[in-house]
Image: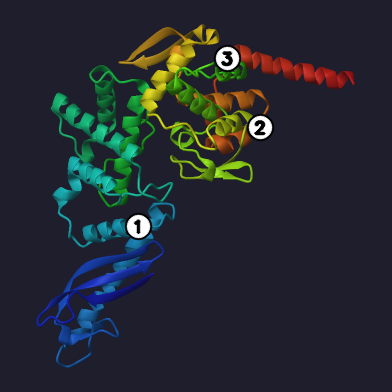
Amino acid sequence: MDIQFYLKRPDAKAHTSIFARITYEAGTCKFYTTESINPVYWNPDTHQAAQTRKFPEYPEFNARLENIRQIIKTTYRKYLNDNESQIPTPGILKDLLDIIFGKKADATIREFFEYYKDFNKRSKQGERLSPKTKKATKVSTNKGFITTLNHLEAFQKTYKRRINFDSIDIQFHSDYINYLTNTAKLGLNAIGDHIKRIKTVLGEAKIRGVKVNPAYESPYFFKPQEQSDSIYLNSSELQKMEALDLSENPKLDRVRDLFLIGCYTGLRYSDYSILNAANIQDGFFEVEQSKTEKTITIPIHLVVKRIFDKYNSQLPQFISNQKSNEYLKEIGEKLPELKVPVTITYTKGGEKITETHAKWVLLTTHTARRSFATNEYLAGTPSITIMAVTGHTTESSFLKYIKLTPNEHAKILKGLWEKRNMLKAV
């Protein structure tokens, strides 16, 4: 870390402010100190007050600058120690120094909603970076934080209870979940998303030096969630869908083809809907995933190749996710195989709800990705290989993602037993 002091206005005729230029691994941070000096007494070569009898207080002045330098270094080291050696961004370092040197008013530090709105503003302007990707957060992510803020403001108004950093405790957690459950009538996983966003805002605030209630780090300040009931299409159902004659309805034809590409690549809709010939390298797809921004390599399945050839190495014209979901249900309704009843269970408004629908009713663009993962698992593809495509980081989360019925698990076990017996017979 290199810390040098400079004058704000080197040509000033009177006192001018002094700022520190801090250069380190994360970039450069410019921090204005509380010191000032007449430029005639400044030595630009040594970056401190000149040692001259015309400025007899230079020893004390330079000692104060050195003290500032040491405080900056101490602040930096403390941040590393408190955050598992994560290097602070220039913005975070400046905020910490502003607080330490009393340049930020207490009201700014304590006002939760003011901080949250500034959080959203920085996100919208691309100034807030994702800790995982080290890049600006996505528009879709930012919209979720705005929705959470709206719910928090409505909660405060309903409960007539002011929310501050110090009031977000275990009781708040309980009351807020109760509000989202019984007043907002949200599902359990949606509630979990709102809790997760609050924890993110509080975590960033703490890193920036804001004093927050530590309760948010407690295991009792949990994110509610439940495993969702979702369907997948098996290999036979996918073959039937591919064979469906949709030539008289170009829209349905395009949506079906896009969906099949998702079923044989494992990509999210946001990724498989924009594939083109430029993504092909030596017979493989090279794709940077929009959500994780990681580049993955996927072999080109024969079904995908047929679709690419059908559209002259291009993909069908893009259709919005919402419209695609509508058209997929039209397509599914045409298949007798998808008219079988499927029962799903979920929590909404604090109540367990059980519904039975024809399988085609539950078709969405995301069914494609889940179908890929489940079918590959059933075919015996190693979990770690499938996870390299789907982006799951743990096998436990992957196994929750794939959708196998108890009967399908039993068939897998039966097949393994038969294979062992055949080996023993040999």
Q: Which residue is at a point 14% across and 92% down the rendered structure image?
A: 54
The outermost residue toward the left is 14
Q: Which residue is mark 1?
A: 89
What x and y, as percent, mark residue 130? 38, 47
What x and y, as percent, mark residue 135? 39, 50
The outermost residue toward the right is 426
Q: Quadrant of residue 260?
A: top right
Q: Which residue is at a point 20% across and 80% down the rendered structure image?
A: 61
**Badge nearest the viewer, 2 or 1:** 2
Q: Earlier in the sequence, mark 2 or mark 3?
A: 2
Distance in Å between CA atoms under marks 1 and 3: 47 Å
Q: Secondary structure at mark 2?
A: loop
The amino acid pointed to by label 2 is Pro
Q: Which residue is mark 2?
A: 382
Can you say whether 135 is above or below 413 in the image? below
* Residue 364 seen from this side: no
Q: Secondary structure at mark 3?
A: loop
The amino acid pointed to by label 3 is Thr
Distance in Å between CA atoms under marks 2 and 1: 39 Å
Q: Which residue is mark 3?
A: 405
Q: Quadrant of residue 55?
A: bottom left
Distance in Å between CA atoms under marks 2 and 3: 19 Å
Quadrant (top left, top right, bottom left, bottom right) of the N terminus: bottom left
Between residue 258 and residue 396, name the one nearer to us: 258
